[in-house]
Amino acid sequence: MSYIGRGLDKISNIEKLDTITFDGSSSYTLQKNSVNFTPNSANSLQVSIDGVVQAGNFTVSGSTIDFGVAIPATSTNDLIFHYGTGVAFTPADGTVGLAQLSATGTKDATTFLRGDNTFAEAGGGKLLQAVTSTSVTNITTTSTSFVTTNFDLTITPASTSNKILLMLSSTGKIPANEICLDIYRSTSSSFVSGGLDRGLCALESANAKFSMPIINLDSPNTTSAITYTIYFKTTNSGQTASFLRDDLLSSFTAMEISAW
C-alpha cells in the first residue's frame, strides 16, 4: 500500500542527545549515547537550561557547543534535541538538478563535475588557435651551417604551459650528401631540435625532389609572440641544397594546444 500522509520532505529527523553536566566551563562536547555527535548547525539544536530554551546564544564547531559564557555547575541541562531535515532516501532518476548540487564553480554546458566537487572546464589538449604560412619560393644554399629560408610564421601563446604543434609540408633536393631542416624559435634564439646536427629532418642524396615533412610539439614556455622560421643547410659545401619549388605550394602551420 502506498504511503498516505505528509510529504517526506516535511518530516524531521529528531534526535535526543545526551544532556550535559555543567562544570563552570563555556564549551562542552555534544554526545549521543556517549558518542561524540556533530550537528548540522547551531540552528539545528534545541537546548534547554534550567527550564529556559536557549536560542542564538551558542555556537557549534564539530561536536563542540560553546555558550560564550561560563555555565555554572549548579545549572541543569534539561534537554538537547537535534532536528535534521527530511528522511534518508534514494532520489529517483532524473530528479537531481544543478540547483541541488553543492559543488562550487560555474555550472554550465562547458564544464564538468570533478572528483573534488568542483565544476571545471574540460581538460587540456584542446586546439586554441592555428596559424599557417605558405610559400612557392625556391631557395638554395651551399652552407654547411643552418641558414634561414625566410619561410616563417608568428604565433602568440595564451599560457606558458601550452604547447605549439609545428607542421611543415615541403620538398627538398640535393645531388649528393644531405639537405637538413630545423626550426628556429625567436623567443629563445635557439633551434627547436635542441641543436641536433641534422636538425628535425634530413634528406639523403638522390638527385630528386622528395617530401620533407616536419611534425614537432614544441614547449616554448612563453606568452610572448614567437616567430618560427625554417632553416636549412647541406652537409657538403660543394653541393647545392634546394628547398621548396615555385610550382608547388608548401605550408608551415603552428597550432596552440592547451596544457594537459
Image (cartoon, rainbow, N blue to C red):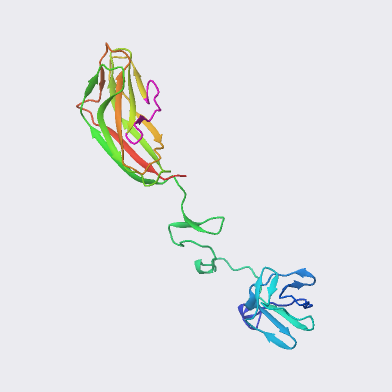
How many numbered discs, if any?
0
Residue toward you, 20 or 210: 20
Q: Quadrant of residue 8?
A: bottom right
Question: What quarter of the picture does the N terminus occupy?
Answer: bottom right
Residue 168 image offset from top left, x and y in percent = 32, 31
Please indicate whether residue 33 sits to the left or right of residue 136 in the image: right
At a point 30% along the width and 29% down the height, the residue shown is: 230
Residue 112 image offset from top left, x and y in percent = 49, 57
- Does residue 195 show up magenta in the picture? yes
Tell me if residue 29 can be seen: no
At a point 25% along the width and 25% down the height, the residue shown is: 244
- Does residue 90 show up magenta in the picture? no
Q: On screen, 37 above or below 126?
A: below
Q: Quadrant of residue 69?
A: bottom right
Tell me if residue 188 can be seen: yes
At a point 33% along the width and 42% down the height, the residue shown is: 224
Q: Residue furthest top?
A: 238
Residue toward you, 58 or 100: 58
Residue 19 image offset from top left, x and y in percent = 77, 78
Please indicate whether residue 52 sits to the left or right of residue 175 in the image: right
Q: Quadrant of residue 130?
A: top left
Q: Main secondary structure of the magenta part?
A: loop
What is the span of residues highlighted in magenta in the rendered image? 186-200
